[in-house]
Amino acid sequence: MKLTDLFARRMVFSFEVFPPKTDRGMERLVREGGVLDRLYQLRPDYISCTYGSSGTRVGKNLEVVSKIRKDCRTLPVTHLTCIGNTKESVERQLQTYLDHGVDHVLALRGDLPAGWDGTRGDFHYATELVRFIRERFGDRFTIAVAGSPEGHIECRSLETDIAFLRQKQDLGADYIMTQLCWDMEQFRRWLDAIREAGVTMPVDVGIMPVLDEAATINMALSRNGCVMERKLSSIISRHWIFPNPFAPTEPEETVAAKKAAFREEGMAYTIEQIDACRSLDISGIHLYTLNKADAVAEIVHEAGIAGSAS
Ligand code: FAD
């Protein structure tokens, strides 16, 4: 099955997982009744697996996507980045994915590890990776690419960022997976702007569930420079758990109660964001699960997107 065929037919629903660094984390992910099994029960159209947070720690990516392939409950999509990769290493890895039955890839530049000013590999941008995959492997891969509704943090302007997105399409990319974006006004403007620029690829919207205060702030601000939309900022303020020069240190029970309240309001916020996205001209909802199956299950049931895969 090719995802491009599915996008042409109906709204797609999918998850992202990451390959855990520890054996215990891996066991939790792949064991019977583990995270993957619980995600399969929600009948996603595909599950993608990240490729090292800084490119150099690729870890058990291949093990995870092969397991998803073998389980035959959904389609695996692997992420692949330019970080530290030569043409030979990319070709070898792509062939290995194909040998394991994985033929969908998200082609990324990758986040530059701290202190690096380039990819230290043969490819500098995702465009070059897309071109290479098409040249060496023809149509054997379905290729997804990243899109940043607020503009990539290093981009010269939103217009140039969109021009590079168009270039990815022209070089053979099939669909877009978006970076997290809580600013829905900006998301709508970006959607209009990419269509205006001739980008016709399906847009699969990446949604970061708001479950944990520290993780939410970290994801938004440590790399991506995302706007923390007013309602989200207000949830964070009301349940603030970090050192505060204007307040005495809080007892542990108060912090625990605030974390629980944050999670509840964050889940409601995430569901509202999914609703807002579904009213737009998009082709899919892609939930970054952070390997948290239970919370994600609650969100997809509540949002009414579980079991849309047929
Ligand atoms: P590019 O499209 O190459 O863009 C990078 C920057 O360069 C942009 O500012 C762009 O405007 C500019 N640019 C692009 N092309 C050119 C050009 N030809 N000339 C000059 N400038 C150019 N990172 C990981 O390390 N591992 C993962 O598994 C991972 N998964 C992700 C999943 C999703 C859904 C998303 C949205 C992102 C993911 N990332 C991951 C993060 C991603 O790697 C970073 O956002 C990275 O900084 C940029 O990747 P990109 O593919 O968008 O880069």
Image (tube, grey):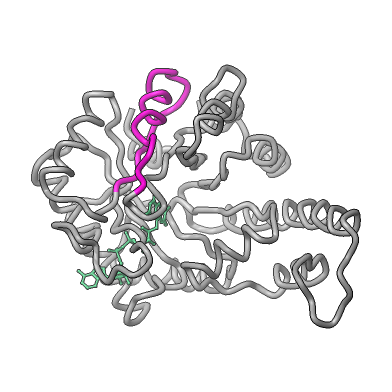
Residue 79 magenta-drawn? Answer: yes
Q: Is residue 85 left or right of residue 70?
A: left
Q: Reply above or below: 90 against 294.
A: below
Q: How many marks?
A: 0
**Quadrant of ligand 1 in image:** bottom left
> Residue visible at 38% across and 30% down?
65
Q: Nearer the viewer, residue 99 or 244?
A: 244
Q: Is residue 2 left or right of residue 210?
A: left
Q: Nearer the viewer, residue 142 or 4?
A: 142
Q: Reply above or below: 35 against 121.
A: above
> Residue visible at 50% across and 35% down?
22
Q: Is residue 87 left or right of residue 72?
A: left
> Residue visible at 47% across and 21% down?
73
Numbered range of the magenta stretch: 57-80
Q: Nearer the viewer, residue 41 or 88?
A: 88
Residue 85 magenta-drawn? Answer: no
How far across and down, in percent of the image, does residue 266 sit? 73, 56
How far across and down, in percent of the image, does residue 66 sit? 36, 25
How far across and down, in percent of the image, does residue 282 sit? 48, 54
Q: Reply above or below: 5 against 100.
A: below
How far across and down, in percent of the image, does residue 180 sit? 51, 60
Q: Nearer the viewer, residue 16 or 291?
A: 291
Q: Quadrant of residue 152?
A: bottom left
> Residue visible at 38% across and 48% down?
52
Q: Quadrant of residue 227?
A: bottom right
Q: Quadrant of the N terminus?
A: top left
